[in-house]
Image (cartoon, rainbow, N blue to C red):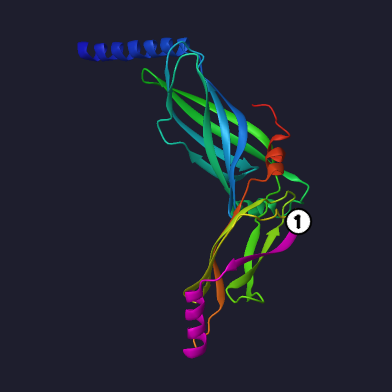
Amino acid sequence: MQSTVKKVLVVLAAALLSNALIGCIKPPTVKLHDIDIAGFDFNKIDLVFDVKVTNPNDFQLDFSDLAYCVTSGQTEIVSGALPSPVMALSGNETTVVRVPVSLEFAGLASLMHNVRAGESIPYEFSSTSKFHFLGLKIPVRMKRKGRLPVLRKPGWRFRKAKFIKGPPSWLELSFEVDNPNVFELPLEQLSGALKYGDDVVLRVNEPNLKPIPPGKTVMFVVRARADGRGVARAIAKALISGQKKSFAFDGRLKMGVPKLLRKMLLEKEPKDE
């Protein structure tokens, strides 16, 4: 009987102490501070949500984890979490936690299907952060609403290769780029190899490329010196062995960050909820 009473008293004392501690702790604040574009390619957009976190207490809190979700209406666009633990937050400290979020064009396609180029769709960035102090868990939730501009998947393809008149060691490669968006796409670099079957005919590393205007499909041409041995092997296979193949380009077209896109993401900045 006495042991049961002691257990009850211990539980009550722990509960009272816990309530007293909770009453002394000011809840941290979590707010969306900024949105940055870390990368843009033909498959996805890499965003970074800068979240400002403030500990208003005089003592340290352990910031253990942050889970986030980006939705539009009832549709989830992307969700994830930062690796745990996040950090220790000193007393009266404010810091910015960077939350990387990748938006896949494939996942955005259904949302953008019926949206016109000049329109936008609503989105909500929500997060749940957990802080700890002396074994107590302090959850903090945050929501931020905004508008997401129309984002449609651009595309690019290799079209053809031809020898240039004059020295036979130079070839001209033609590529086509589709930009279905309302902002200009900067192109930074084309790199890769032109192949005839398995043989490398030439290699390309071209950084001087013009941007693609909004809503346009543009053809561009680059010239490069052929690999003599690769050309010789390709000709031998085509003429002597009768192994006729097609030219194929194996490489990468790197895009820069569209400046107008960042402006579109930030121009209407609603208040935090």
Question: Looking at the image, which is closer to me, 263 or 269?
Answer: 263
Quarter of image, res 16: top left
Question: Looking at the image, which is closer to me, 90 or 23?
Answer: 90
> Which residue type carries mark 1?
Gly
> Could one spot residue 136 in this view of the protein?
yes
Q: Residue furthest left?
A: 2
The x, y position of residue 124, in whole percent, is 63, 37
Residue at (53, 81) in percent of width and height: 245
- Count all numbered tags in the image, as a single digit: 1
Residue at (52, 83) in percent of width and height: 235
Residue at (57, 31) in percent of width and height: 50
- In the image, is residue 254 above or below residue 201? above
The x, y position of residue 262, in whole percent, is 67, 40
The x, y position of residue 92, in whole percent, is 50, 14
Residue annotated with mark 1: 215
Describe the element under mark 1 as helix, strand or loop. Answer: loop
Quarter of image, res 191: bottom right
Is residue 222 rendered magenta in the image?
yes
- In the image, is residue 245 above or below residue 64? below
The x, y position of residue 40, in whole percent, is 60, 48
Is residue 46 rendered to the left or right of residue 214? left
Residue count near mark 1 (Cα–Cα under 10 Å), binned few <14, some 14–19, many ≥20: some
Q: Give the range drawn in magenta.
A: 216-241
The C terminus - image quarter: top right
Is residue 258 rendered to the left or right of residue 65? right
The N terminus - image quarter: top left
Q: Residue furthest front?
A: 167
- In the image, is residue 114 above or below residue 193? above
Is residue 267 rendered magenta in the image?
no
Is residue 65 rendered to the left or right of residue 75? left
> Could one spot residue 1 in this view of the protein?
no
- In the image, is residue 48 above or below residue 109? above
